[in-house]
Amino acid sequence: MQVEKPGLIVAPLTPFTADLDVDEGALRREIDYVVRDCRATMVVAAGVETQEYTYLSLEQRKALIRHTIACVDGRVPVMVGISHPSFRTAIFISKSLPIRFHDEHPD
């Protein structure tokens, strides 16, 4: 998949319900908006250190990443953030998600 250059790379805000769960419906609408209407050329899933994902458990973060990938549905590339203060946790995150690296599957 080619990325348009220059392009708009969007790191969506993580919407929450009143119960402080990730609002998956709102996230889907946000991603649809930035991809379809704003013409984002890439979406970032839990990848900006100031994003709300830092307050989620590891399982919630992985679910957020999976849901973001599902919402994008191949329309644009997804950059997945695996940053963590523990490099072991970062490696664990990278190995436990449905991630394909661009150079492993070129178009």
Image (cartoon, rainbow, N blue to C red):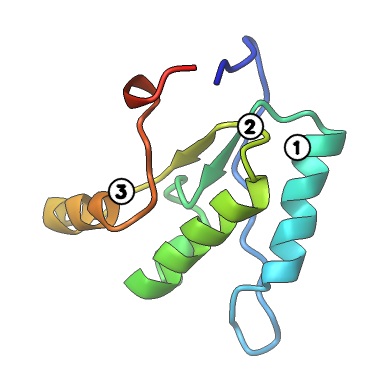
Contact, CB < 8 Å: mark 2 with mark 3? no
Which residue extends farthest bottom?
19
Residue type pointed to by label 3: Ser
The residue drawn where x is 26% and y is 54% is 84
The residue drawn where x is 64% and y is 89% is 19
Contact, CB < 8 Å: mark 2 with mark 1? yes
Label 2 vs 1, first from the N-terminus: 1
Q: Position of residue 56 (x, y in %)?
A: 43, 72
Instruction: Name the front one of labels 3 and 1.
Output: 1
Q: Secondary structure at mark 3?
A: loop
Label 2 vs 3, first from the N-terminus: 2
Name the residue beneath numbered marker 2. 76
Whole-angstrom CA distance, mark 2 to mark 3, is 22 Å
Q: Position of residue 28 (x, y in %)?
A: 73, 58
Q: Secondary structure at mark 2?
A: loop
Name the residue beneath numbered marker 3. 83
The residue drawn where x is 80% and y is 57% is 29
Q: Secondary structure at mark 1?
A: helix
Name the residue beneath numbered marker 1. 35
- Indicate the quadrant containing the N terminus: top left, top right, bottom left or bottom right: top right
